[in-house]
Image (cartoon, helix red, strand yellow):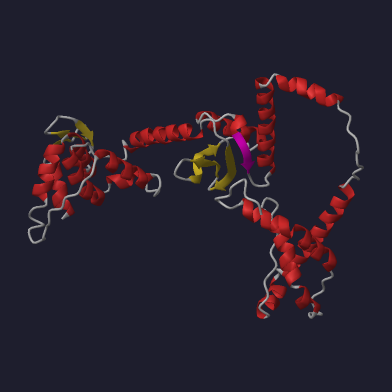
């Protein structure tokens, strides 16, 4: 069947063997080679009427025994293009999918009925670019003069680093108040992922949407040093912006220098205490690693106990969860004389009690529909 269709396509072309080019008998255009897919694509794009006539006649013999029904539905060129854009963006299908034979068989009658040129892998990006500008204009209008929050993160996959920037804001209308989340950009990072470099990329995206730094209410990121540095330099840039915009701020700062501060309380340096806490956590981390080896892991599984987790520096609450799971094993480990452990259980319990509220608060902060004014 496929060879018969190929022969019917090639009947519209003359092959020049010396130049290895196929000459269209309808419009005279020369095409490289004699591949039936390229020839059929040319007919669809440039000689639509001829192609539809051939397409209908070419399948008439093979479909004589098939029962066909005529269907009708309302559609527009804009709706069709919008759906095709979703296929290659939201659904992540490759552009070449639009050139597949089965897809063309479905879409060609629609293109013909609407009198529109076919959308192929070669022109889909033109429509995507137009849609991109339309979405950006809507976001620009939405955020104009509004406070916004940003969420930033960097993901590394297959030797590529992508910076994701999301926007979150409260939008109020007469009908309702809602939290809106928009993706401002997914930017591939080429340079070293320093805080300054990431900051510049963020500023480029904000500038593209007409968002000034004084509109940014907060920035949420992970605990990566480069991300923290990026937020710090954004704060520096914000201070410079406000300093330039508000001439009265200089006078205010000068006045603050003359104010005498009373009731100054002595705050002892916490460096030594912080070092002690870090050592305690390190000791617990070493114990958790020991309990995860094959010998102890098997014992825990046989007794239906959870295997202790390990914390990750850039993941919220991972240290809290590691110590909490270790504390859950306290009574069990006390009965296992051959498992040599001697952690400071009292300190672990104190740590869990101290950070329990902070753990619940961070869970609340990660809520997609968080409203800033909400109280715990």
Q: Residue at x 70, y 35 (%)?
A: 232
Q: Position of residue 332 (x, y in %)?
A: 75, 77
Q: Please state which of residues 71 and 280 is positioned toward the viewer in this rendering.
A: 71
Q: Residue at x 87, y 52 (%)?
A: 273
**Measured along the vertical axis of the image, is residue 208 above or below residue 169?**
above
Q: Residue at x 20, y 45 (%)?
A: 110
**Residue 54 lies in quadrant:** top left
Magenta span contains residue 318 = no
Magenta stretch secondary structure, dominant: strand
Magenta segment:
216-220
User: In what quadrant of the picture does the C terminus appear?
Assistant: bottom right
Q: Residue at x 16, y 50 (%)?
A: 72
Q: Please state which of residues 324 and 45 is positioned toward the viewer in this rendering.
A: 324
Q: Position of residue 175 (x, y in %)?
A: 44, 44
Going by the image, does 88 lie left or right of 255? left
Q: Position of residue 350 (x, y in %)?
A: 81, 62
Outermost residue toward the front in this view: 174
């Amino acid at each position: 069947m496929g060879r018969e269709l190929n022969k019917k396509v090639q009947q519209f072309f003359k092959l020049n063997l010396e130049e290895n080019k196929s000459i269209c008998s309808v419009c005279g255009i020369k095409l490289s080679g004699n591949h039936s897919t390229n020839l059929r694509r040319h007919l669809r794009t440039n000689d639509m009427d001829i192609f539809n006539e051939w397409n209908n006649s070419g399948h008439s013999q093979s479909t004589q025994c098939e029962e066909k029904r005529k269907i009708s539905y309302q559609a527009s060129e804009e709706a069709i293009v919008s759906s095709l854009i979703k296929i290659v963006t939201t659904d992540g299908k490759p552009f070449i999918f639009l050139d597949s034979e089965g897809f063309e068989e479905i879409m060609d009658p629609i293109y013909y009925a609407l009198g529109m040129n076919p959308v192929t892998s070669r022109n889909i990006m033109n429509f995507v670019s137009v849609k991109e500008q339309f979405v950006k204009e809507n976001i620009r209008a939405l955020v104009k003069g509004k406070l916004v929050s940003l969420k930033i993160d960097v993901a590394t996959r297959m030797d590529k680093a992508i910076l994701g920037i999301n926007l979150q804001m409260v939008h109020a209308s007469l009908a309702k108040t809602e939290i809106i989340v928009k993706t401002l950009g997914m930017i591939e990072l080429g340079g070293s992922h320093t805080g300054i470099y990431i900051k510049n990329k963020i500023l480029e995206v904000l500038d593209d949407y007409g968002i000034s730094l004084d509109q940014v209410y907060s920035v949420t990121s992970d605990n990566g040093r480069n991300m923290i540095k990026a937020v710090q330099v954004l704060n520096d840039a914000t201070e410079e912006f406000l300093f330039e915009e508000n001439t009265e701020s200089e006078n205010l700062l000068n006045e603050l220098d003359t104010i005498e501060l009373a009731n100054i309380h002595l705050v002892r340096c916490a460096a030594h205490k912080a070092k002690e806490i870090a050592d305690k956590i390190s000791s617990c981390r070493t114990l958790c690693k020991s309990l995860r080896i094959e010998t102890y892991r098997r014992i825990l599984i046989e007794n239906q106990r959870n295997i202790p987790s390990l914390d990750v520096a850039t993941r919220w609450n991972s240290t809290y969860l590691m110590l909490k799971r270790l504390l859950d094993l306290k009574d069990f480990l006390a009965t296992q004389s051959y498992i040599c452990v001697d952690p400071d259980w009292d300190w672990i319990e104190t740590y869990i009690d101290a950070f329990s509220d902070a753990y619940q608060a961070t869970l609340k902060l990660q809520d997609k529909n968080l409203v800033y004014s909400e109280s715990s």
